[in-house]
Structure formats: C-alpha cells, structure tokens
Image: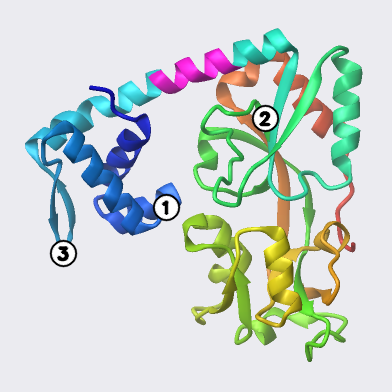
Amino acid sequence: MDVDTRLLRYFIAVAEEGTLSRAAQRLFVSQPALTKQIKQLETQLGVRLFTRSRTGMTLTEPGRALAERVPGLLADWDQVLRETKSAASRAARLLRVGFLASAANEATPRIIAEFSRRRPGWRVDMRQATWSNPSAGLADGDIDVALLRLPFPDQDALRTAVLFTEPRWVALPEGHALAACDVIPFRDLWDEPFVAAPTETGWWRDQWLATDERGGHPVRIGAVTDQPDDWLSAIANGYGIALAPASAARFYAWPGVTYRPVSGVSPSQVGVAWRVADDSNPVVQDFVHCCLERPLPEVTTP
C-alpha cells in the first residue's frame, strides 16, 4: 500500500497539536479540508487513528504506534528529496531562489548580477511562492535560498538575516476620506473594512491585518482575495483597505488606488533565508554574501 506523505504530515500535525483547529492553522489549510484528509488516511490504513471529542483529538493505540514512526520517516524522506534536488541543481549550475511579492525590491537585480559575477556559468531561477507558503518553499526543500518577509512561522529552524526594513503603509481607494492625509494613525483605520488574504494563509493574513497591534479591537473584513490583481481591484472598487509595504506604491501601482504612510504600526523586514545544512554550501553562501556584503539603505518612502 502506498500512502501520500502529505497525509502523514497532516496526521502528525494533528497528533502534535491535539486539535484540528490548531493543526489547520499550522498547516495553512482549512479545518474541513484537514478533517477530510485524516479520514482518507484512516480509510487507506483501515484503522481509526484518533478518538474525537469536544476537547480535541486523542490518539488511539494504532495512532500512537504510527505517531512514533512518522516523524523519523518524514525526516528521512525530506533529506532524500533535498539531496536529490540539490544534486540536480548543482549539475545544471542552477540556484533556485524563492521569494514572496517583490522579493528584495530594487536590490534584487543587483544581488543576482553580483552572484553571476561570483559564479560564472550559474543561473538564478527566481520562483515566486503564494502567500500561504511563507518560507517560499525553503522549508520543503523546493528551493535553495529565499528572499522573504520576516518573521515567518518556524523561522527558528532556518538561518535568516535581515536585508532592510521598510514601513507598512495603507492602500486606499482614491476617493477615501483619509486618502488626502499625509500620515494616517493606525488607530483611525481599526473600524475600516480590510481586504484580507484567505484564512488558510494563516500567518500572512494576520501579519497584514496587524491583528496583534489592534489592542484586541476586532478586524472587519470587506473582501477576501488570494492574488495581487484581485487584491488591488477590491481596494479600487471600495470594498476595503489594506496594509502594504511602502514599496508597494512602486511595485503595485493601480488605477483608483493610492498609498499613504501609517503611524502606530510596526515596519516590515525583508531578509534572506537558507537551511542550516547549507552553512557549508559554497554556492548558497555566495548568494547570501551577495545579499549582505553591500549595505542596503533603509526604505522610508516609495
């Protein structure tokens, strides 16, 4: 019998978290989808893995036996995949760089040019990840190094270094009452409807709703989108506003959308990230050095 490793990852997340809701947040999936996957695994194995109750999910005896073996099995499989993909990249002289949104802004071309100078014959393959994948594939071994927004979930398991910091601004419809303000206090935006990422993006959604910086004030959601163009269109059509990096005014200009500085909300950081195992990988370290050796200016205005 062949079992999808994805089902095993879902299983161990539920086993470790003890509830479907916490496991779903950790996995960046919806709770109904997670429940369906656990039932699928139980059906394939022909055993009941959990006892469900109002307080959570308790492992059955077969479930405990599986939970003891799965982490080691997945770790071995992940290592095999990383080594295989890394070998393929080295053979092709290809460095896979994951990124979210605009990567390292205007610094990205300079970083790639410097890496090409250091590594003649090597090519950088830039791979954009979705908002629901905050490590841009680095944690899964799909890429070699990443340019990311910091912090992100499970960041402590990886190496990271900050490249630069930029303020968070707000994207507004041009006709919004606050669109003419030079600087908008974040508190003045608390009661506004926000255009949000889908709930399954977890950390990313909370980060750009600034849920931890509202003093417990609830968030109003005016629209939910999962693509930049849909996000901008929703703002332009007046369904809500949204926090964004200051650089979004340059990279995501859109008819009917204006950007304004916001006070009282923390800035956003962009960093480079790589796996601990690649501390001794000379190609990855060359890319990291290209990111860090020339100081990047603080980003304060678009």
For marks 1 and 2, the one nearer the N-term is 1
Is residue 227 one of those drawn in magenta? no
Q: Is residue 5 visible?
A: yes
Q: Residues within 10 Å of mark 1 (few under 14, many from 20)?
A: some
Marks 1/2 in contact by CB < 8 Å: the verdict is no
Disc assigned to residue 54: 3
Q: Is residue 266 visible?
A: no
Q: Which amino acid type is shown beneath numbered disc 3?
A: Arg
Q: Which amino acid type is shown beneath numbered disc 1?
A: Val
Start and end of the magenta stretch?
A: 77-85
Q: Considering the numbered disc 1 on the image, is that residue within a helix, a strand or a loop?
A: loop
Q: Which residue is mark 1?
A: 29
Task: Say if 284 sits above or below 203 in the image.
Answer: above
Residue in view at x 62 percent, y 20 percent: 278
**Magenta-drawn stretch, dominant element (helix, strand or loop):** helix
Task: Measuring from the top left, give residue 183's x and y in whole percent.
Answer: 83, 80
